[in-house]
Amino acid sequence: MDKVFIGISSESLPATNQRTAYVAATRGKEQAQIFTDDKNELFKAMSRPDDPLSAANLAEGIQSIPPLKSRQARSLTTAQQLAAVARHHDAIQQSNTAPSVTDRDTSHDR
């Protein structure tokens, strides 16, 4: 290709780095025009080095994820805490809607 047009929106910047910018820009033999909505952020993204993960680094990341049972237990605890808060909120709402002593009919004989 002799000329290329490259469009990189600000939404695509997290996926942009030195390597992706180089590959896109060197597709054109004569000319490459880059269009973006945020020039400063594009320059920052294009200056980020591309550090691919090795298999060992990837395996380390997988090992740092807590086991499923641990995540489920944490989720259950959170759900139980939210249920307790909801029950407390309902109790407060019911006590606020109960008639007070001054609202009751006091005209009857005792």
Image (spheres, grey):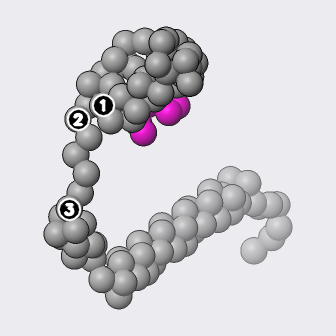
| Cα separation between marks 1 and 2 | 5 Å
Residue 15: in magenta span: yes
- Identify the amino acid type marked 3: Ser
Report if the CB atoms under discs 1 and 2 are less than 8 Å apart: yes
Q: Which mark is residue 26?
A: none
> Which residue corresponds to the image point at 30% horizontal and 21% vertical from the top-left?
44
**Is residue 25 left or right of 65 when viewed as pictured?**
right
Query: Is residue 101 shown to the viewer in this render?
Result: no
Give the magenta range.
Answer: 11-16
Mark 1 lies on residue = 18
| Residue at numbered disc 3 | 54
Give the mark nearest the N terminus, 3 or 1.
1
- Give the residue at x 56% y 24%: 1
In depth, the one of 3 and 52 nearer the eye is: 3
Q: Secondary structure at mark 2?
A: loop
At x 64%, y 65%, the residue is 94
Tell me the element at label 1: helix
**Disc nearer the start of the sequence (2/3):** 2
Q: Position of residue 98 (x, y in %)?
A: 68, 63
Tell whether 100 sits left or right of 87.
right
Above or below, 46 relative to 75 = above
Looking at the image, tell me whether mark 1 or mark 2 is earlier in sequence order: 1
Q: Relative to residue 65, is residue 19 depicted above or below?
A: above
Q: Position of residue 15 (x, y in %)?
A: 42, 39
**Residue 44 vertical placement versus 39 (above, below):** below
Q: CA distance from mark 3 to mark 1?
A: 18 Å
Q: According to the image, label 2 marks what residue?
A: 49
Q: Is residue 104 above or below residue 1?
A: below
Residue at disc 3, secondary structure: loop
- The amino acid at mark 2 is Pro
